[in-house]
Amino acid sequence: MRPPRIITALALLPVSLAFGTGQWPQFRGEGGAGVSDSGNPPVHFGPDQGVVWKVALPSGHSSPCIWGDRIFLTSYDKAKLETLCLRRSDGAVLWRRSAPCEQFESTHRIGNPATPTPATDGSSVYVYFGSYGILAYDFEGGEQWSKPLQTPVVEFGTSASPVLHRGKLFLACDQDEGSFLLALDAKSGETLWRKERSEFRRSFATPFIWTHGSVEELIVPGSIWLKSYDPSSGNDLWTYSGTSRVACSSPVAGDGLLFSASWNVGGDSDSRVTMDAFEDFVRGLGKPADAVLQKDDIPKGPVRDRFSQMDLNKDGAVTREEWEVMRSMFSRAGNALLAIRPGGKEDVTESHLVWKTTRSLPYVASPLFYKGRLFTIKNGGLASCYKAATGDVLFQDQRLDAPGDYYASPVAGGGRVYVVSQRGQMVVLAAEDSLHVLSRVDFGEPVMATPALVEDLLYVRTESALYALREAAAAR
């Protein structure tokens, strides 16, 4: 955008809008809730209206992390991974720092090695790249500490973002081999505890701190299980069994309950994927019981499509043990939106489940608790809303006329809910008991990153740019 237009846009801002205040400090903002009610975000806006500023960015799927007049993002540009700091008042890039990685992790065809969102505590910013590890910078771009980590064993890349809480930085690293959960001292980068999660396979969900009363829990979605840990020690608190094979969405809390959604192929009751025992399968192929399988040995279908997931050590072959791990996961997987009450210990699958639905489930987009309601968005542009406390359906499978997949999570503020598809179509909903679309916006290019809300502004990262948006003057 040309400087004169930027100046004009800024001049029109209300005097009460202060760029030195406000925050959206991690993935999905304060507490990972996806909610900011400190201002009045826009209803009418778009790529050519209500634009305070627009800044071209290198590729990346990380969301804006905001504190005061600073915006932090990560990017992947010409075989280089970077952390960027922008000035919130005009979008100017204040500094950029490269991660010293030598080999880049593999990613999904629509993925990006700059996907995890930074986190900040107001004095430092923390970033995670699967291709390197964790880096901490001060607000002027000075490196404070770094912690290299092994590149995860999963060909789709990393997605889970670091989470800050009470001076600790938490990171979930679920992968096909060697999954673990890490807690670091945010000031020094020192490892406070590390919890091995060998029973878990690849997952991409960001952990969530669940606070109820005086109790704090670190909730980590994973393959087949949803698990709670003591944030101070890493000790197990409870486990819910029967979630999807791969966790992609993050939990949220409200009305005294924890909400978690998971969906993946093969977990629905009417389309469950089953596998023969290894001995029976290889016998049918005329192979010995100790055979190893190549991809071409398996008939075309959902099992063969997941050959790389069965091949845990990525050696190009599947052993009996690897086959049976996948067979067990398919048999135990469950797709559902869950509401869990607090106070559980050990296995809470039956004892602490308040309500559950298996219809209209989101794949990657996290559920959103807002004003006593729980909102979800399913691929295809199907919106649902429930009474959070009871699970009563307010509306379900309502079409938004914005088809496509949804990788960004919903956010809310000012009595509105914002959802955006991979195609870049954003729909603004009224936070009400029935579906009420307030506006639709087409950014004209893909959007993978979850938007951010700070005061009266909405921040949207598209494939090529970052927008700061306010209510369009013409709509006032």
Image: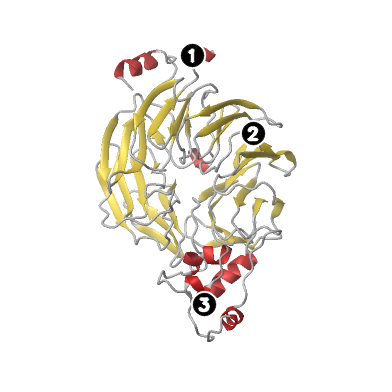
240 displayed left or right of 80 = right
- Which of disc 2 and disc 1 is earlier in sequence? 2
**Mark 3 vs mark 2: in front:** 3
Residue at mark 3 to residue at mark 2: CA–CA distance: 47 Å
- Which of disc 2 and disc 3 is earlier in sequence? 3
Of residues 222 and 113, the one drawn nearer to the viewer in this rendering: 113
Dot 2, crowdedness within 10 Å: few (<14), some or many (≥20)? some
391 displayed left or right of 452 = right
- Which of disc 1 and disc 3 is earlier in sequence? 3
Residue 186 location, x and y as percent? 36, 49
Q: Is residue 249 above or below residue 96?
A: below
Residue under label 2, please give it.
Answer: 371
Residue 94 in sight: yes
Which amino acid lies under the numbered mark 2 shown in the image of this protein?
A: Lys
Q: Residue at x 34, y 24 (%)?
A: 90
Dot 3, crowdedness within 10 Å: few (<14), some or many (≥20)? some
Label 3: element kind = helix
Quadrant of the frame with the C terminus: top right
Which disc, if any, is residue 306?
none
Residue under label 1, please give it.
Answer: 473
